[in-house]
Amino acid sequence: MSTTTLTTDTARTRLHTLTVIDVRTPGEYASGHLPTAHNIPLDALGRALPALREAADRGELLMVCASGARSANACALLARDGVTAATLDGGTTAWAAAGGEIHRPETTGRTVWAMDRQVRFTAGSLVLLGLLLALLVHPAFQLLSAGIAAGLVFSALSNTCAMAALLGKLPHNRPGRADLDTTLANLRRG
């Protein structure tokens, strides 16, 4: 089963008929999301499956992430369970670039970083740490920097990111149980 991909123009004209599911982490979602989007992180789709199935029975689901890669993965996961969904071509990045409205919830003074920024900060910090430890402690610490570089190359070639998956498990990137329960209840209400 192939995944249906909607362009930003098509999604914009049909937004009022779509149930939009943002599969990014809560931190990424808080940094800006499509209007009407519900936040259900990719790793919570299994728990959300009954509510997503109900929503799909009422109309079309549109899965969204930053670039379209995670939302395409979400569509494939849902398809295995018999739920049809489309993905937004280029994700929220393309949506914003095309002039689409982005909602940003009120923050409590805490700055939220997008996942790609978190990955760049972490990778850069680890490379710098490896180089400093190699200079100050032992040359073998260069292997830390080499390992991070190899991981970044693999990430680019495979269009996956193990570091993002690990960072997504940190508390600031995880929805509270109450938040996900509220999202699922709102999704069931339609």
Image (cartoon, rainbow, N blue to C red):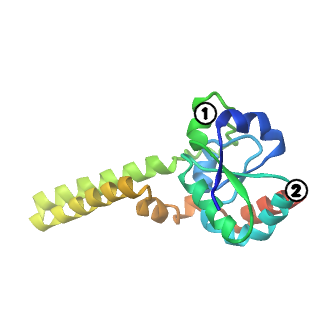
Q: Horizontally, is 13 left or right of 8 in the view? A: right
Q: Secondary structure at mark 1?
A: helix
Q: Horizontally, is 144 left or right of 119 in the view? A: left
Q: Secondary structure at mark 2?
A: helix
The spot of residue 17 in percent (x, y) is 83, 44
The spot of residue 61 in percent (x, y) is 75, 53
Q: Which residue is mark 1?
A: 96
Q: Residue furthest top?
A: 99
Inspect this view and state whether residue 65 appears: yes
Disc number for residue 58 = 2
* Residue visible at 60% across and 50% down in the picture: 65
* Residue visible at 69% across and 38% down in the picture: 103
Which quadrant: the C terminus?
bottom right
Near-viewer residue (53 or 5): 5
Which quadrant: the N terminus?
bottom right
- Three-letter residue code for mark 2: Arg
Q: How packed is label 1: few (under 14 Cα within 10 Å), some, or many (20 or more)?
A: some
Q: Is residue 142 above or below residue 99?
A: below
Q: Which of marks 1 and 2 precedes in the sequence?
A: 2
In this rendering, the label closer to the viewer, 2 or 1: 2
- Three-letter residue code for mark 1: Ala
The spot of residue 59 in percent (x, y) is 84, 53
* Residue visible at 60% across and 41% down in the picture: 92
Q: Horizontally, is 170 left or right of 26 in the view? A: left
Where is residue 95, by image quadrant? top right
Q: Is residue 99 above or below residue 147?
A: above
